Image (cartoon, helix red, strand yellow):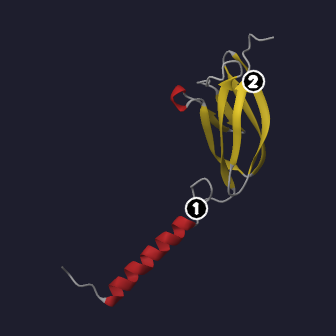
Amino acid sequence: MKNFTKRVRSAFALGLAACALAACTLGPNGMGASGYGTVTGRVVDTQSLQPISGATITIGNIVAVTAAIDKGAFALRNVPLGAHTITISAVGWKSYTGQVTVLQDSGADAGVIGLPSSLDR
């Protein structure tokens, strides 16, 4: 086994410390960019409470689509901090429009959002 000089060991330790510092400064979205967060939630049918797959969720130009395997869950990443209008639509269901506020360290949880069938009166 090769013995490293004190200078090499110091440089290696300094490199490790720089990497650790960089990892600690990541933003809430995991991308290292402060000023952005993630909006999460679930979309379900109001009658059956079953997840709606294929629902489209938008905040500005950020779009997510729910899938059957995700149980109606969605995550919109890199949403700027502050108040936003969230819109959810799906074929066969009435659309939903509401407000979410993305916070610096916690993003936003829109919770479970129920969509009524478009056949309901």
Estimate the x, y position of residue 32 in percent, counting from the top left.
58, 60
Which label sits on residue 95? 2
Q: Quick one: SS at disc 2? A: strand
Does the residue at mark 2 contact the one at mark 1 (Cβ under 8 Å)?
no
Residue 49 in which image quadrant? top right
Look at 68% across and 38% down and name the residue there: 61
Estimate the x, y position of residue 93 in percent, counting from the top left.
70, 18
Q: Quick check: 7 left or right of 72? A: left
- Is 36 situated above or below 41? below
* Residue that badge 1 annotates: 26
Look at 41% across and 80% down and name the residue there: 13
Q: Farthest bottom residue?
A: 6
Q: Quadrant of the N terminus?
A: bottom left
Q: Farthest left residue?
A: 1
- Amino acid on which the number 1 mark rests in the picture: Leu
Q: Earlier in the sequence, mark 2 or mark 1?
A: 1
Q: Quick one: SS at disc 1? A: loop
- Amino acid on which the number 2 mark rests in the picture: Ser
Look at 20% across and 81% down and name the residue there: 2
